[in-house]
Image (cartoon, rainbow, N blue to C red):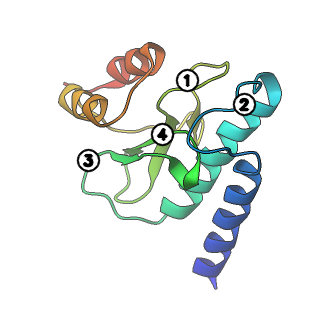
Amino acid sequence: MKKLVHVLLSVAAMVVGCSDRQGDQPHPTRSGEMATKREYSVLEGVESQERSRVHAGAPLVRKHALGSEYDAVGLPSKGSDHGYVWIIANSDTLPDVKVLPEDALFTVTPSQVADVAKQVVLSQEVQDYLNAHATK
């Protein structure tokens, strides 16, 4: 039953988050509150899907997360063997760094940040944020 709820929430987030999708390119007129809501809906959907996933300490990369134009990066939750903290790799709107769950602790090393940057384009703000939180 719990898995069914997660799947339904993920599908709902995908439908809401992708309702104006046109190919893989961002909509040229998207800005402000609607775009911010769209980015957060992608984060909510991915976080819901991966909430109970056991991690081995490595970040996850979801290109075109939930069929959107956004790439999401999952960082292993600190102090737990499961769950990830999700971040939009290259946000279109302010704030430049969107993280879910907010204020959650995660683990990442400088080499993992570099590996993620090879897989997806990270905005400078996201790269700075990850490097500032990286453990040596």
Q: In terms of depth relative to the viewer, which is nearer, 124 or 136?
A: 124
Tag 2, which secondary structure? helix
Q: How far, Cα to Cα, is label 3 from label 4?
A: 17 Å
Query: Considering only order in the chain, which callout, 1 or 3, is on the residue closer to the N terminus?
Result: 3
Where is residue 135? Give x, y as percent. Answer: 25, 27
Q: Any mark on residue 51, and which?
A: none
Q: Which residue is mark 4?
A: 71
**Of the residues shown, which amino acid type is indicated by label 1?**
Val
Q: Are marks 2 and 3 in contact (CB under 8 Å)?
A: no
- Left or right? Give the position of 65 relative to 18: left
Tag 1, which secondary structure? loop
Quarter of the rendering occupied by the C terminus: top left
Q: Residue at x 70, y 50 (%)?
A: 18
Q: Are marks 1 and 4 in contact (CB under 8 Å)?
A: no
**Of the residues shown, which amino acid type is indicated by label 2?**
Thr
Q: Which residue is mark 1?
A: 97
Q: Residue at x 50, y 36 (%)?
A: 87
Q: How far, Cα to Cα, is label 2 from label 3?
A: 27 Å
Instruction: Select label 1 or label 4 by which is in front.
Output: 4
Q: Any mark on residue 36, and which?
A: 2
Instruction: Select label 2 or label 1 by which is in front.
Output: 2
Q: Residue furthest right?
A: 33
**Of the residues shown, which amino acid type is indicated by label 3?**
Ala
Q: Residue at x 44, y 50 (%)?
A: 84
Classify mark 2: residues with Cα within 10 Å, few (<14), some (14-19) or many (20+): some
Q: Any mark on residue 58, and which?
A: 3
Query: Considering only order in the chain, which callout, 1 or 2, is on the residue closer to the N terminus?
Result: 2
Q: In terms of depth relative to the viewer, which is nearer, 12 or 44?
A: 12
Quarter of the rendering occupied by the N terminus: bottom right
